[in-house]
Image: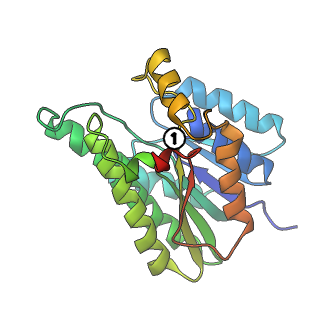
């Protein structure tokens, strides 16, 4: 009997990372659940995956550290599952104005949101000899000019470009795509009133459900003729 395939989800402890990890478990994948600071949330997500009857392995790593990334993938080599899916979901969203945003905050966002997915993709590709899927979680903001989040917006735009470069470079064995969610889970920076105002502007006049975002991942798993694409799930936000 062949071993269950493995999916690595970075930032998998909470928010959309948790949702992607659970969706992959439901699709029959063993899960390597990465987290950085969110140890309690990672443990709760791992319990939810076990409740689905799937193996789960928790690993702590600072993805801005090359050494930590290398150690994370060495951990994969010890597991009894072939790596088939990488979801780059971990992200940082520093708020600031271009006039005052510090170099440290800018660098931190680029390091986690763009450099880490690149390094993780490099390591994953070494372990996907029989094919695989890499999915980068971007944001509808990659197509906008969010002046309040310059580092985040630039990093996500870069991630969409990286998706295309990786897709071309790693084909045909490895497919690389991106998912760009719109309004789904409010961030700490958005008040209830502001969230309501943003949602009411949407053509579909409601936020996405988590399942509507994870269904994009399930679609990419099923359709093996898609690579280099960004699947936008935004309720029409990009039309504004």
Q: Residues within 10 Å of mark 1 (few under 14, many from 20)?
A: many
The quadrant of the image that shows the N terminus is: bottom right
Judge whether residue 79 can be spotted in this image: no
Location of residue 162 (image quadrant): bottom left
**Foreground: 39 or 9?**
9
Q: Measuring from the top left, give residue 142's x and y in whole percent.
A: 39, 51
Q: Is residue 148 above or below residue 28?
A: above
Residue sitting at 42 percent across and 56 percent down?
A: 117
In the shown orientation, is residue 172 left or right of residue 91? right
Residue sitting at 75 percent across and 32 percent down?
A: 48
Q: Measuring from the top left, give residue 157's x and y in whole percent.
A: 36, 56
What color scheme is it? rainbow
Judge whether residue 210 can be spotted in this image: yes
Q: Measuring from the top left, give residue 130's x and y in whole percent.
A: 65, 78
The quadrant of the image that shows the C terminus is: top left
**Foreground: 158 or 131?**
158
Q: Is residue 197 above or below residue 5?
A: above
In the shown orientation, is residue 132 left or right of residue 152? right
Asked which secondary structure carries label 1, the reply is loop
In the shown orientation, is residue 226 left or right of residue 97? right
Q: Measuring from the top left, give residue 213's x and y in whole percent.
A: 64, 45
In the shown orientation, is residue 237 left or right of residue 223? left
The residue most toward the bottom is 172
**Foreground: 181 or 94?**
181
Q: Is residue 120 above or below residue 105?
A: below
**Foreground: 15 or 119?**
15
Label 1 belongs to which residue? 11
Residue sitting at 30 percent across and 46 percent down?
A: 145
């Amino acid at each position: 009997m062949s071993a269950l395939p493995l999916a690595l989800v970075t930032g998998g402890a909470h928010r959309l990372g948790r949702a992607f990890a659970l969706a992959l478990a439901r699709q029959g994948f063993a899960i390597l659940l990465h987290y950085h600071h969110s140890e309690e949330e990672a443990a709760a997500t791992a319990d939810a995956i076990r409740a689905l009857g799937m193996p789960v392995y928790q690993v702590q790593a600072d993805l801005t550290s090359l050494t930590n990334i290398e150690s994370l993938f060495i951990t994969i080599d010890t597991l009894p599952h072939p790596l088939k899916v990488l979801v780059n979901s971990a992200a940082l969203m520093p708020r600031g104005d271009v006039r005052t945003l510090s170099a440290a905050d800018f660098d931190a966002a680029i390091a986690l949101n763009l450099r880490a997915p690149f390094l993780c993709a490099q390591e994953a590709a070494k372990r996907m000899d029989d094919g695989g899927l890499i999915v980068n979680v971007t944001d509808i903001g990659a197509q906008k000019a969010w002046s309040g989040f310059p580092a985040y917006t630039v990093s996500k735009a870069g991630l969409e470009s990286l998706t295309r470069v990786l897709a071309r470079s790693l084909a045909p064995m490895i497919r690389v795509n991106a998912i760009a969610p719109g309004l789904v889970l409010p961030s700490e920076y958005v008040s209830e009133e502001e969230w309501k105002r943003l949602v009411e502007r949407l053509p579909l006049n409601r936020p996405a459900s988590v399942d509507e975002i994870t269904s994009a991942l399930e679609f990419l798993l099923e359709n093996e003729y898609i690579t280099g694409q960004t699947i936008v799930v935004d309720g029409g936000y990009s039309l504004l």
